[in-house]
Image: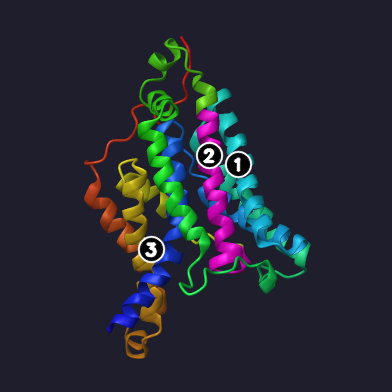
């Protein structure tokens, strides 16, 4: 493997890691507040669909990106309202988002574009690459978001409130923190980043909308949250690892003799196997927020 090939694999890794990084960092903030959102796949799928529709309608890919962010935040508002204010079952709510997305997007693709299962937006609706580097500007944005989110969580009063609500909501409530509002806003923030990841997939990296758009990335992002021990900067490392294995699988598909020996379906499992191996290695070492997944009810 020569230097040029290594550089190309690393360049492609920036694409495969970006949706994982955005989604994982957002979910870290959400879970730090005590709320679990397993509906990341559904948020990415719906946001990707809306991003394509808006980008095509306006002939502006950045309008599509903003639409993806907005629809993600809206879904986060719904999930956060159910979780924080209605004290509902967070896992069931997230599962509902995923199931709704599967039906909505499959129907929406046919209703909007008259095709089944797959639509490719025109070039004018796709996010342009950074000249010379040939990488996505959303990758750079994702890195900035990661650094700023880490600073917000561990160096600001806002982050302290988020972490205190996830660790001990009773104590936070006593000192005047609005537990439900913090959880709602944290959930909206996390879902908006998942929405940005969905827009990245549909009008940037993959440049298509399909009913299988996330392809398990939402669940891999959940694994990265555990791997990173709920730390955004460690999520950057985890996303790079998983993104690399995703790229490696695609690279292997282009090697004739390897492709002839290893079935394509087996090659496609590489990132998922890597997820299992890496996650298994940190089980028992990571410590989730103490009150995550449990609705806070005042006595």
Q: Dot 2 lies on which element?
A: helix
**Residue topped by disc 3:** 243
Whole-angstrom CA distance, mark 3 to mark 2, is 23 Å
Q: Tell me the residue at 64%/40% (across/down).
A: 74
Whole-angstrom CA distance, mark 1 to mark 2, is 7 Å
**Which percent across, then down, holds residue 51?**
66, 57
Asked whether residue 291 is drawn in magenta, I would say no
Give neighbour class at mark 1: few <14, some 14-19, many 20+ (Cα, 10 Å).
Answer: many
Q: Quadrant of the N terminus?
A: bottom left
Up/down of 113 relative to 189, above or below: below
**Which percent across, then down, holds residue 46?**
63, 53
Q: Tell me the residue at 32%/61% (across/down).
A: 241
Q: Tell me if label 1 and label 2 are in contact, CB under 8 Å.
A: yes
Q: How is the image coloured?
A: rainbow
Q: Tell me the residue at 55%/24% (across/down).
A: 181
The image's mark for residue 73 is 1
Q: Dot 3 lies on which element?
A: helix
Q: How would you classify the magenta stretch by its main secondary structure? A: helix
Where does the magenta region start and end?
183-210
Query: Can you see residue 271?
Result: yes
**Residue topped by disc 2:** 189
**Which percent across, then down, holds residue 172?**
41, 17
């Amino acid at each position: 493997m020569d230097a040029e090939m290594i550089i190309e694999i690393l360049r492609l890794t920036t694409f495969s890691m970006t949706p994982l990084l955005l989604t994982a960092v957002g979910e870290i903030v959400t879970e730090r507040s005590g709320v679990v959102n397993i509906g990341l796949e559904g948020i990415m799928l719906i946001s990707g669909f809306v991003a394509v529709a808006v980008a095509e309608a306006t002939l502006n890919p950045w309008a599509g990106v903003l639409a993806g962010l907005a629809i993600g935040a809206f879904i986060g508002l719904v999930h956060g309202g159910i979780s924080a204010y209605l004290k509902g079952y967070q896992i069931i709510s997230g599962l509902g988002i995923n199931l709704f997305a599967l039906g909505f997007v499959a129907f929406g693709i046919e209703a909007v574009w008259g095709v089944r299962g797959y639509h490719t937006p025109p070039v004018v609706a796709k996010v342009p690459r950074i000249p010379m580097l040939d990488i996505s500007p959303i990758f750079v944005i994702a890195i900035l978001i990661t650094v700023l989110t880490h600073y917000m969580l561990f160096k600001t009063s806002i982050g302290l409130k988020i972490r205190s609500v996830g660790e001990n909501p009773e104590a936070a409530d006593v000192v005047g923190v609005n537990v439900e509002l913090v959880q709602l806003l944290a959930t909206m923030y996390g879902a908006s980043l998942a929405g940005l990841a969905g827009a990245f997939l549909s009008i940037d990296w993959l440049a298509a909308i399909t009913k299988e758009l996330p392809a398990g990335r939402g669940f891999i992002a959940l694994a990265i949250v555990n791997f990173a021990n709920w730390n955004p900067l460690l999520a950057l490392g985890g996303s790079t690892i998983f993104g690399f294995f995703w790229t490696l699988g695609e690279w292997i598909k282009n090697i004739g003799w390897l492709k002839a020996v290893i079935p394509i379906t087996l090659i496609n499992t590489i990132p998922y196997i890597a997820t299992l191996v890496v996650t298994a290695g940190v089980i028992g070492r990571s410590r989730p927020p103490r009150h995550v997944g449990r609705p806070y009810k005042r006595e």
